[in-house]
Amino acid sequence: MSGYDPGSEGAQMSFREKMSYSDYLHLEKILDAQAPLSAAHDELLFIIQHQTSELWMKLAIHEIRSAKAAIRDNQLQPAFKMLSRVARIFEQLNNAWDVLRTMTPSEYTQFRDSLGQSSGFQSWQYRAIEFLAGNRNEAMLKPHAHREEVVAELEKILAEPSLYDEALLLLAREGFDIGPEAKRTDWRQSRQPSDEVMAAWKKIYQAPGEHWALYELAEKLVDFEDYFRRWRFNHVTTVERIIGLKRGTGGTAGVSYLRKMLEVELFPELWKLRTEL
Ligand code: HEM
């Protein structure tokens, strides 16, 4: 095809006075945002892996927020679509570990000191996703105290019901007894699993045909958490493969901290009820 000019079939070839692909996507900004601090070959991989993860997290936050609002408005079909997308985003992030895994401990060691104390532990978007989903821990606000706008954003999320809270409030509106949670007004802390909520979901799973929409909602939530758990597992496995049992740059004990986080359950009753069915 050498010498072929796509302009001859109408491809726009001049953008002096028109918005181009780069202009629309602000590519200069994005492609100018990689600034390795060392001469190590693999630092660019490390930076791009984190930046692309943050971009996907931005989209996940957008989708979870809208899914929450849709559930609040009893608009379950759009909520299902958004929750499916969130699960697919995490699947995408899970596949991305394959690229990072090509970096060996020897290669990471060449630039690890350049990171200083910075760590994904300080990813405010990751905390936003956890807070939005329902895993809330005020201590996680502390690393952001130097950035008022970030704390304000996270505080705003904590002031409102989580995605799971919205699902439970919907159960209450649909006539299920969810116990005292139906009257809850303070959302800052993670909720404790409750027998009433468990009993409500159990009724739904025992008669899916009678409660199809709620049954589907439950499965969308489980799907999201399933992919999220895989992300945590892939992260800790990659971390062990690359730094072994060394402490994290963020200051935690590293792998043992991340293993503890594997125990977090976003939607506990939806997992527990499976034993009882
Ligand atoms: C060489 C690759 C990586 C290593 C060695 C690594 C290591 C660690 C360690 C040790 C922690 C615990 C906190 C600390 O003490 O630093 C951590 C937390 C975290 N990392 Fe990574 N990480 C890597 C890649 C990534 C990537 C690509 C992401 C994507 C954004 C990421 C996101 C996170 C998040 C969100 C946390 C907080 C987890 C939580 O608090 O539950 N990490 N990482």
Image (cartoon, rainbow, N blue to C red):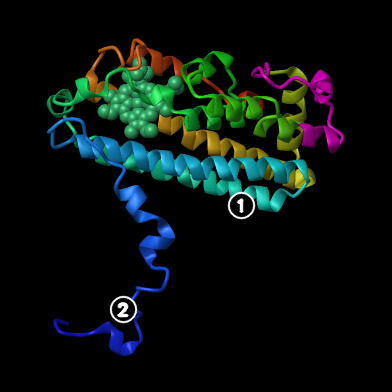
The mark found on residue 13 in the picture is 2
- Alpha-carbon neighbours of circle 1 within 10 Å: few (<14), some, or many (≥20)? few
The mark found on residue 220 in the picture is none
Q: Which residues are magenta?
A: 169-192
Q: Nearer the viewer, mark 2 or mark 1?
A: 2
Q: Secondary structure at mark 1?
A: helix
Q: Is residue 62 left or right of residue 245?
A: right
**Is residue 237 among the parts visible in the rendering?**
no
Q: Residue at x 63, y 24 (%)?
A: 155
Q: Is residue 262 left or right of residue 2?
A: right
Q: Residue at x 34, y 10 (%)?
A: 253
Residue 158 location, x and y as percent?
Answer: 65, 25
**Amino acid type at mark 2:** Met
Q: Which residue is mark 1?
A: 81
Ligand 1: image quarter: top left
Residue 183 falls within the magenta-colored stretch? yes
Q: Is residue 6 above or below residue 236?
A: below
Q: Secondary structure at mark 2?
A: loop
CB atoms of marks 2 and 1 within 8 Å? no
In this view, which residue lies farthest toward the right?
Answer: 175
